[in-house]
Amino acid sequence: MTTQTMTETAIKSGAGARVPFDGISEPGAYVCETTGQLLRIPQEELASGRAR
């Protein structure tokens, strides 16, 4: 994979995008900007009607 292709893939996937915690709508792994901790958000946690 070329550097250009890797960059295009990252942009298309939203890699590096800033999202407020209450704005997370997709399951995945997120990095907390203030602490650097990796947060894993599974699909089950995004289920409608679930308390945060």
Image (tube, rainbow, N blue to C red):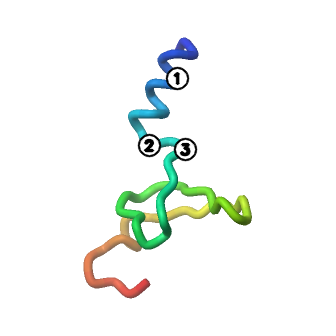
- Please give the name of the residue rendered at 51% of the width and 16% of the height, measured from the top-left corner: 4
Q: How crowded is mark 3: few (under 14 residues within 10 Å), some or many (20 or more)?
A: few
SS type, badge 2: loop
Which numbered disc covers residue 14? 2
Residue at the disc numbered 3? 16
* Comes first in the chain, label 2 or label 1: 1
Q: Distance between the residues labelled 3 and 1?
A: 13 Å
Q: Element at badge 1?
A: helix
Q: Where is residue 13 in the image (x, y as percent from the top left)?
A: 42, 39
Q: Distance between the residues labelled 2 and 1?
A: 12 Å
Kind of residue indicated by mark 1? Met
Residue sitting nearer the eye, 40 or 10: 10
Q: Which amino acid does label 2 sit on?
A: Gly
Residue 4 higher or lower than 17, as above or below: above
Residue name at image x 34 percent, y 83 percent: 50
Query: Which residue in the rendered view is the most extreme toward the right?
Result: 35
Q: Which mark is residue 6?
A: 1
Q: Is residue 34 above or below residue 28?
A: below
Q: Nearer the viewer, mark 3 or mark 1?
A: 3
Residue 29 pos. (x, y %): 53, 55
Which circle's residue, 3 or 1, is located before the other in the chain? 1
* 47 up-or-down from 28: above or below: below
Q: Is residue 47 above or below residue 10?
A: below
Q: Given the image, on which type of amino acid does mark 3 rest? A: Gly
On the image, which quarter does residue 22 sit in? Answer: bottom left
Q: Which residue is drawn at 55% across and 57% down?
A: 30
- Measuring 45% from the left and 33% from the top, which residue is drawn there? 11
Out of 28 and 22, give the one closest to the viewer: 22
Q: Mark 3 falls on what kind of element?
A: loop
User: Marks 2 and 3: in contact by CB < 8 Å?
Assistant: yes
